[in-house]
Image (cartoon, grey):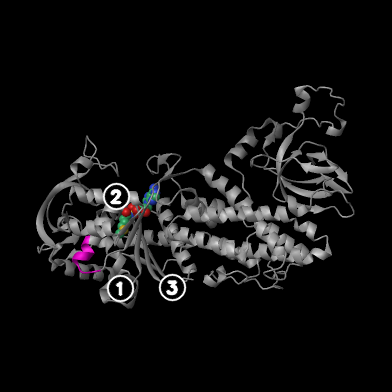
Amino acid sequence: MSERRTYYLTTPIYYVNDVPHVGHAYTTIAADALARSRKLRGHDVFLLTGTDEHGQNIERIARERGIPEQQHCDEIAAVFRRLWDRLGIGYDRFIRTTEDVHKRGVLKLWDRLVGARTPDGREAIYRGKYAGWYCPRCEAFKDEDELRQPGNVCPDHERPCEWTEEENFFFRLSAYEEWLKAQIESGRLRIDPEGRRNEVLGVIRQGLKDFSVSRARVKWGIPVPQQPDHVLYVWVDALSNYVTALGFADDAPEYRKFWEGADERLHMLGKDIIRFHCLYWPAILHAAGVPVPTREFAQGWMTKDGKKLSKTTGNVIVTDTLIDRLGVDAVRYFLLREGSYGQDWDFTDKAFVGRYNSDLANDLGNLVSRALTMVGRYCEGRVPTKPGLVAAVEMRFEEDLQLPGTVKHRTGVVLDSYEALDFSGALSEIWSWIAQLNQSIVNVTPWELAKDPARRQELEAFLYRLLEAVRIAAVLVSPVMPGATLRILRMLGQQGAPPNPSDLAWGVLEPGTALGAIEPLFPRVETKTEAEAKEKSPVSDTPVPTPAPPAAAPAGGEKIDIADFAKLELRAARILEAEKVPGSKRLIKLQVDLGDERRQVVAGIAESYEPEAIVGRNVVIVANLKPAKLMGVESNGMVLAASRDGKAVLCTFAADVPPGTKVK
Ligand code: MSP
């Protein structure tokens, strides 16, 4: 693997004016996934997150709640930490701007700024008079042309701005135009995605205005030493967290390692705060003689059902509710898979549940359970013999699975996609592999190999490689779903430690290792529309008289009435389990998912299908047949199949449909 690099990586620090929002979770999960992918490559990573606790807004909210500001901040910061813990965010430090070490750090930076000179030799900080429209929610002055009329309304917060006149300290941003442009154009400060970079360059071209860095009317903040009745502008206070958290105040070793000495200093943020991060912050640092960030990545905006997320209109997504519904891994997976990071995207509940069922329950869940079930059945639940690299079976394997070389290539593609913050790309690469692995089981037909003792070596070679492929796919998914990875690794009989670079190598599984117990990874859930459809469905409420089985259907092309056909209740059913009926050559006992119920159905298909081969398939069953006993086993329905040359061919669907869907 490449040389070990030092990466510093931050999320914005979130305002404590309210409890966490799904947008906060989105940025934080993305940052955590990137940090984990870099750790997986063996790099030295420091992930910082935290809370932004000063300013007029907090002052107002605490007053409204009738409690001291600090108490309010403590309470909300704790809610953020709890949610990050619940989401499995592996942050290295949670900074709060009310911490003493932060305040000392901000004052040190301020001290350097006060004595600093601009590139053209003027004072970087000066006293001046400010008059303008101030939005207390943004904690920023707004240009007149940004405001919505009438009422001078802030477009972000939809509230009127206040006309404010103050004697303030200013930062001479205008003197840093050329320097900022050169930084960004040269790529020394890389801004992603490219559209955002162009936007920032566009703002510079229009000319940068100096901005005021102290506030006279705010109490809840860090007092300006030169004018103690002022506090430092909350954005100067907040941005400084990126260095103060590492111990800038005391020139701590962590500061020297992860800020000054880092190979990359990356800030991840939303597009709403680009101006502060890409213009104000680098200029401030440069003026103070401190190294500047090397990269900033602005993510896209999330909406729900095509509309802006807003508490006022009730269009909200509560992260805890998403977790309660489908679990932490599913939430992390969906947020990073559905949208393209950096672009705007829309959250819908339907897509959340849909992806859960198709990507997690079906594709990944089925692969893991099929692989482990076969090893359980054919290899007594132990990792089979490791195949030699040049055996004849390799050729077959190359077609059906992936040879180690190909795996290495795939691993590289996935890790590079993470590195480019293309989480969706990384996941779709893993999922195309998962699809191939599922297909390889169908192609190789291990159940056929198992019948022939002479093909034992071939069987073991296939299963070994399948397990290895499952293991590596699980490791590759770990930056996004660390919990699922550990569960899969445990099922593979591995230690429960977070994966490291050696886990990406081919051939880690030791033959003979006992596999752990198989646990359901992602149990399928019902979508809202499925549930609603069932409630409305006349079929489930009104039992239809049992029709005669198809064998007794009118012969010789005699036509039936549509009413006769309507008596049949045909439904999609997903096969959950399949096993041969002992003592029968023909019968397989199936457990099927019918959406709202689980059923046992016996089918005469054992001469045509191996039980393992049909688990996960979506078939058609006659759902309203009277129960019958076949070889003493109860059957509640009938599976439809065609017969070709004496072999059964199951009726399936051209595209995935939810179990229980009516077939007409
Ligand atoms: N406290 C400042 C940041 C200071 S950093 C030195 C702040 N806080 S915030 O609580 O408003 O968080 C803003 C960030 O939350 C955005 O930059 C973005 O990362 C995330 N998001 C909030 N809502 C979002 C969406 N609807 N969609 C995507 N991300 C969003 O600004």
| Residue at horizontal 48 percent and vertical 59 percent from the top | 87
Residue holding disc 2: 198
Q: Secondary structure at mark 2?
A: helix
Label 2 Cα neighbours within 10 Å, binned few <14 / some 14-19 / many ≥20: some
Q: Amino acid at mark 1?
A: Gly
For residue 353, side relative to residue 642 (left or right): left
Q: Amino acid at mark 2?
A: Asn
Residues shaded magenta: 283-290
Sequence-wise, the earlier of marks 2 and 1 is 2
Up the image or down, 660 lies above or below 407; here it is: above
| Residue at horizontal 29 percent and vertical 71 percent from the top | 101
- CA distance separating discs 3 and 1: 27 Å
- CA distance separating discs 2 and 1: 33 Å
For residue 378, side relative to residue 3 (left or right): right
Marker disc for residue 3: 3
Q: Secondary structure at mark 1?
A: loop
